[in-house]
Image (tube, rainbow, N blue to C red):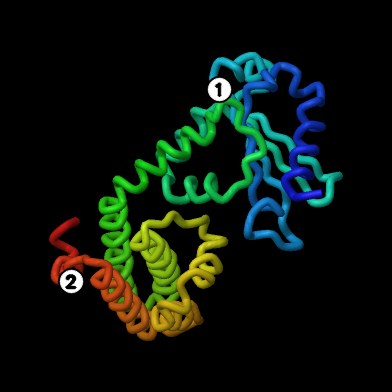
Amino acid sequence: MTATDVHTRYLERLLDQPDFDLLRKNRISAIVNGSSADSRVDSNSDWDYKIFVEEADIRPFVERHGEKFSLSDNTHDPKVFVMIRPFGYLESELESTLAITLWICEKAKVLRDDGGSFQQRVSKYRAKFESTLPEQLQHKYLKLRTRRHGIDGVVKRSDALAARMLAQDCIKISLQILHLVHGKTYPYPQWLYKVSADEYSQSYSETFGTIKALGLELEASQIQAWSRKLVGNMIDIMVAKGFDRLRLERWWEYI
């Protein structure tokens, strides 16, 4: 039995429970992620189901159970978490965290998609992601430079803890930029380094060496030096992808 078959059978049993009798069960879209349905499977992976329903079809269910219905099945191995939401919730997530939510939607296993409602929305926001890439990259790059500049300020005050916190931000943002310059979405922070290293570490070994060094417990002055090097690495990567070096170096003019 395939992973998809296992999830589909579980979903069918789930929807037969009395809690779900007010759902129009022929009008849903269901996905599962963080599980054997995608590339992040390991012994710690739970099943994370998200069931989306059109606004009109979920209204009776919401009136009984509330707008934020979810349940956990801790008796199942692996554990199962189920969330039921209107499609408006998915669209709100895509609007607010486009790159991350789109990554999840495109990596998840689609168990059901009655009427193609889920895929229509994913396609719509994929087009939006691609059309807004320049703005996303500018926003991330300015955020990176601002965090890096902040390190200089806390180093003057000998605040190594604050410098480490800002350095972690620099690492996260740099990895996100690395995905964006290749026209790709990126995952949540807890998966970001592994996914990025699997995909890009061979092509950008120097950058990943800098990231590993910056991730160590360093003195404030060392954090300052390694974070400067990381910004330099990212500028080189972006210039190789067609960005203007002078514009990247004079970043403060575009805040």
Q: Secondary structure at mark 2?
A: helix
Q: Which residue is mark 1?
A: 54
The residue located at (80%, 41%) in the rendering is 73
29, above or below 232, in the image: above
Q: Amino acid at mark 1?
A: Glu
**Image marks 1 and 2: residues in contact by CB distance under 8 Å:** no
Residue situated furthest right in the rendering? 75
Which corner quadrant holds the C terminus?
bottom left
Q: Nearer the viewer, residue 138 or 218?
A: 138
Q: Nearer the viewer, residue 3 or 162?
A: 3
The residue located at (43%, 45%) in the rendering is 97
The residue located at (44%, 65%) in the rendering is 172
From the viewer's perspective, tell me whether residue 183 is left or right of residue 20: left
Q: Which residue is mark 2?
A: 245
The residue located at (66%, 29%) in the rendering is 69
Residue 167 is tagged as none
105, above or below 215, in the image: above
From the viewer's perspective, tell me whether residue 246 is left or right of residue 150: left
Q: Quadrant of residue 156?
A: bottom left
Query: Gap between marks 1 and 2, in whole Å?
Result: 47 Å
Where residue 161 appears, as percent x and y from the top left, is 45, 73
Q: Amino acid at mark 2?
A: Arg
Q: Earlier along the polypeptide chain: callout 1 or callout 2?
A: 1
Q: Residues within 10 Å of mark 1 (few under 14, many from 20)?
A: some
Q: Nearer the viewer, residue 130 or 196?
A: 130
**In this orientation, does residue 153 appear?**
no
Where residue 235 appears, as percent x and y from the top left, is 27, 73
